[in-house]
Image (spheres, rainbow, N blue to C red):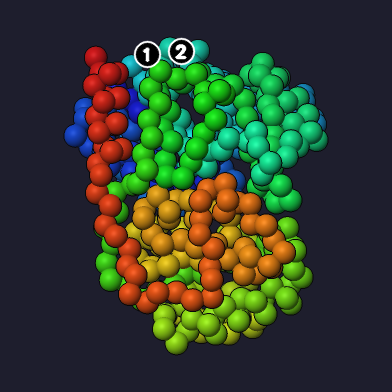
């Protein structure tokens, strides 16, 4: 029997794990989940899709290199108990986090197969990006210690969106949705492109507005009062034609009560920020999603949902480079009420899973 291992560090990764798991049901394999414990994971989540769950410590980038080394040693000791071998497969997000890198390298050292998927791959060598020397030095200190690899960090100019790059060798690589990964950093004989994930839509009159009160100035250049004024103006433009829902970023420090006090919307139309965005889309089909650059927008775009950027709407001087990089259209103050989400049923990812499982079975 093959063993399939998954990594969960944030909600999008867990949703992707569930998608892969769904396509594995017809195969004789066991499924094992490794969770990097942090504020971004939900340990009370339903993990019934998996045969077992291992909770591991997240390792943060740090100048304290002895601490990083000790953390690596502890993690590798735990991984040794798994008896990883050539019949195992690790399904991993891009190698941004240190524990993720250590796990990936460990599986490679045991001749296991590896698959990396990406929703947010980029080609950074153009005018939309800047090289982040400070972060590159810090990240490289850490990755040279744990993996003997240099890391280069790029930012979309004048934004908090950062992208670490290191050279990787993996058996399979899957680029999903708007992701456009730089192949010069990826050594893989099996590079797949999945434009859309399978998604069943239904009629809806909902416009979901994604706000991020944790990075107001970084994303928009506005202060908090200016930001809420813009959000309220946006609601006033749409509320007569659509049902408006608001969801704040899970990292926000503001309570729902604070949001209600500052935004002209009923409490019932504010989605608890702790609810996974991906799980929300399982039960609800917004006609439109409005927001600024985020992985959640990239996931929704891969489902075929109408996603529009409000970057320039919030601040006309904002160049909104995230939208240029990933191909989001901008919100123009009007929405077409008859536009609906289209069903997407390509089975492309399922076919890729079938191919991989045929390749690794014994």
Name the image quarter holding the N terminus: top left
Residue lying at 24% horizontally and 49% vertically, measured from the top left: 345
Say what secondary structure mark 2 lies in.
Answer: loop
Residues at marks 1 and 2 touching, judged by CB atoms closer than 8 Å: yes
| Disc 2 target residue | 110
Residue lying at 25% horizontally and 33% vertically, measured from the top left: 351
| Disc 1 target residue | 86
Residue lying at 49% horizontally and 76% vertically, measured from the top left: 334
Q: In which quarter of the image is residue 20?
A: top left
Query: Residue 327, how many percent across, how many down?
Result: 51, 51
**Horizontal side of residue 211 vs 340, given as left or right:** right
Question: Label 1 crowding class (10 Å Cα cut-off): few <14, some 14-19, many 20+?
Answer: some
Q: Can residue 216 be seen in this view?
A: no
Q: Residue furthest left?
A: 26
Q: Quadrant of residue 241?
A: bottom left
Query: Residue 169, how many percent across, how many down?
Result: 50, 18
């Amino acid at each position: 029997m093959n063993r399939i291992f998954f990594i969960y560090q944030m909600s999008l990764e867990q949703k992707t794990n569930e998608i892969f798991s769904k396509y594995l049901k017809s195969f004789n394999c066991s499924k094992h989940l490794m969770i990097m414990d942090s504020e971004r994971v939900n340990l009370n989540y339903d993990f019934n899709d998996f045969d077992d769950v291992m909770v591991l410590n997240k390792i943060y980038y740090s100048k304290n290199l002895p601490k990083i080394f000790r953390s690596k040693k502890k993690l590798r000791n735990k991984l040794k108990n798994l008896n990883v071998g050539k019949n195992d497969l690790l399904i991993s997000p891009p190698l941004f986090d240190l524990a993720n890198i250590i796990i990936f390298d460990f599986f490679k050292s045991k001749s296991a197969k590896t698959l990396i998927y990406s929703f947010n791959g980029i080609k950074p060598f153009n005018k939309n990006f800047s090289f982040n020397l400070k972060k590159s030095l810090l990240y490289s200190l850490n990755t040279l210690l744990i993996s003997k690899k240099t890391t280069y960090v790029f930012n979309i100019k004048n934004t908090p969106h950062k992208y670490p790059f290191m050279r990787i060798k993996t058996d399979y690589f899957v680029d999903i949705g708007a992701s456009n990964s730089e192949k010069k950093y990826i050594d893989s004989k099996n590079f797949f492109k999945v434009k859309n994930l399978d998604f069943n839509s239904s009629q809806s009159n909902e416009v979901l507005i994604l706000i991020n009160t944790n990075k107001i100035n970084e994303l928009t250049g506005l202060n908090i009062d200016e930001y809420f004024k813009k959000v309220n103006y946006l609601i006033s433009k749409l509320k007569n034609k659509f049902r408006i829902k608001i969801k704040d970023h899970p990292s926000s420090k503001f309570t729902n009560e604070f949001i209600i006090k500052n935004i002209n919307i009923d409490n019932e139309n504010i989605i608890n920020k702790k609810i996974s965005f991906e799980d929300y889309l399982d039960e609800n089909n917004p006609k439109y999603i409005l927001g600024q650059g985020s992985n959640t927008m990239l996931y929704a775009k891969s489902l075929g949902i109408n996603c529009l950027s409000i970057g320039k709407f919030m601040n006309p001087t904002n160049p909104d480079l995230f939208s240029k990089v990933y191909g989001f259209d901008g919100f123009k103050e009007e929405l077409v009420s008859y536009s609906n989400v289209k069903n997407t049923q390509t089975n492309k990812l399922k076919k890729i899973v079938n191919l991989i499982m045929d390749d690794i079975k014994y």
